């Protein structure tokens, strides 16, 4: 039997590399990744992520992996690749990330996250793809008053260009389901962390600073909270969505257990065995006050269940960071 061809965009990134690795490990998949290796953070970090996927592909897992250096906004090259591959499934993780950089470069975020998604959806439809998984974000909920966040909340008041671009990508996905009946599942991820996490994100940044005895920048009074979600739980949610994708649907993929910033720092102190030096700063524009995933839809329809307690996940992350060649 021919293996399933699966296209994974952003395959050299944090979540994309974990998903690509999981697919090649389970076998039966020819995984083709694309990534543009942009300069948002050091290229060597992404190259290390790719090496991990390649090791899994060559370690007897049964799946194959290839990587193309390609930007999703390059419509001619993207269309040609998808036409050549004719993937049965597309998993779309490539995006411009980060709330604060999006405030500085809003048009770039719209170009990559909305226009790039439209190019990929168009190529998927033209070449007979059967399902499309879109990585979205809890940021689309904005500062909604009601918690936990539910997928049927309006999500029409984003407070950053990044959040708006992710919501725009979801809406383009719905249009392609309506017009062409391409099944699209939009997965709203809630503050994913774990091995390979991007170096600009709080857990990665705070851990390195604590371990080196340097002050950590804390914006606000520490009362903001996030629904931290360990990457293995996210991967399980993605694979469950891939198996079931049969229409347009939105799912929260979160830990469903919000943790305040002050509590997160206390956890990191315990896990690292070192005290944190706090550099207190004003709250930043574009940051939501809290996130909290209602995962009842994902639990009922995908069998999704977050399994990793925050302190256990942080311990695994710190162990990875201390053993890693790439900081």
Image (cartoon, rainbow, N blue to C red):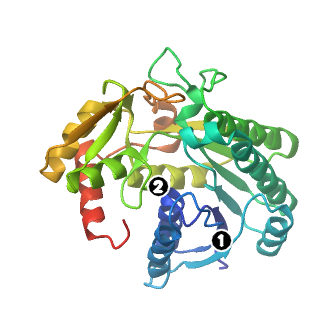
Q: Sort mark 2 into few (<14), some (14-19) or many (20+) by Cα contacts within 10 Å.
A: many
Q: Residue 263: in sight, yes or no?
A: yes
Residue at mark 2: 235
Asked whether, in this view, residue 251 is left or right of residue 59, the answer is right
Spot occupied by residue 38 in the image (x, y as percentages of width and height): 62, 63
Asked whether, in this view, residue 10 is left or right of residue 236, the answer is right
Image quadrant of residue 63?
Answer: bottom right
Residue ID at (77%, 57%): 73
Q: Residue 309: in sight, yes or no?
A: no
Which residue lies most toward the left here?
Answer: 273
Quadrant of the image for the N terminus?
bottom right
Quadrant of the image for the C terminus?
bottom left
Asked whether, in this view, residue 64 is left or right of residue 146, the answer is right
Spot occupied by residue 235 in the image (x, y as percentages of width and height): 47, 55
Residue ID at (72%, 47%): 108
Measure the C-alpha gap from mark 1 to mark 2. 18 Å
Towards the viewer: 175 or 113? 113
Residue at mark 1: 4
Closer to the N terminus: mark 1 or mark 2? 1
Tag 1 secondary structure: strand
Towards the viewer: 236 or 162? 162
Vertical placement of 301 versus 232: above or below?
A: above
Towards the viewer: 72 or 103? 103
Vertical placement of 249 versus 206: above or below?
A: above
Vertical placement of 199 versus 327: above or below?
A: above
Q: Sort mark 1 into few (<14), some (14-19) or many (20+) by Cα contacts within 10 Å.
A: some
Which residue lies most toward the top here?
Answer: 145
Tag 2 secondary structure: helix
Residue ID at (41%, 61%): 196
Residue ID at (42%, 28%): 292
Mark linked to residue 207: none
Spot occupied by residue 61 in the image (x, y as percentages of width and height): 46, 79
């Amino acid at each position: 039997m021919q293996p399933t061809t699966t296209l994974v965009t952003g395959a050299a990134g944090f979540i994309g590399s974990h998903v690509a690795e999981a697919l090649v490990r389970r076998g039966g998949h020819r995984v083709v990744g694309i990534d543009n290796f942009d300069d948002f953070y050091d290229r060597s970090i992404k190259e290390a992520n790719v090496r991990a996927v390649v090791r899994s592909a060559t370690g007897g897992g049964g799946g194959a992996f290839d990587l193309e250096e390609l930007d999703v906004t390059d419509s001619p090259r993207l269309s040609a690749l998808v036409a050549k591959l004719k993937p049965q499934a597309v998993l779309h993780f490539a995006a411009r990330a980060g709330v604060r950089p999006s405030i500085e470069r809003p048009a770039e975020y719209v170009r990559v996250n909305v226009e790039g998604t439209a190019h990929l959806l168009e190529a998927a439809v033209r070449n007979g793809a059967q399902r499309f998984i879109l990585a979205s974000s809890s940021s689309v909920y904005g500062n909604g008053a009601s918690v936990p966040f539910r997928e049927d909340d309006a999500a029409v008041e984003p407070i950053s260009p990044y959040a708006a671009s992710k919501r725009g990508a979801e809406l383009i996905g719905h249009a392609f389901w309506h017009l062409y009946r391409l099944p699209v599942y939009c997965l709203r991820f809630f503050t994913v962390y774990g091995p390979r996490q991007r170096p600009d994100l709080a857990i990665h940044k705070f851990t390195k600073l604590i371990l080196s005895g340097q002050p950590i920048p804390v914006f606000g009074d520490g009362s903001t909270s996030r629904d931290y979600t360990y990457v293995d739980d996210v991967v399980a949610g993605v694979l469950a969505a891939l198996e079931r994708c049969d229409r347009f649907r939105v799912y929260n993929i979160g830990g469903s257990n919000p943790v305040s910033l002050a509590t997160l720092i206390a956890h990191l102190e315990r896990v690292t065995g070192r005290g944190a030096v706090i550099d207190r700063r004003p709250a930043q524009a574009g940051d939501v006050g809290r996130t909290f995933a209602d995962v009842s839809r994902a639990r009922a329809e995908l069998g999704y269940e977050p399994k990793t307690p925050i302190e256990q996940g942080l311990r695994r992350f710190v162990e990875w960071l201390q053993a890693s060649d790439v900081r």
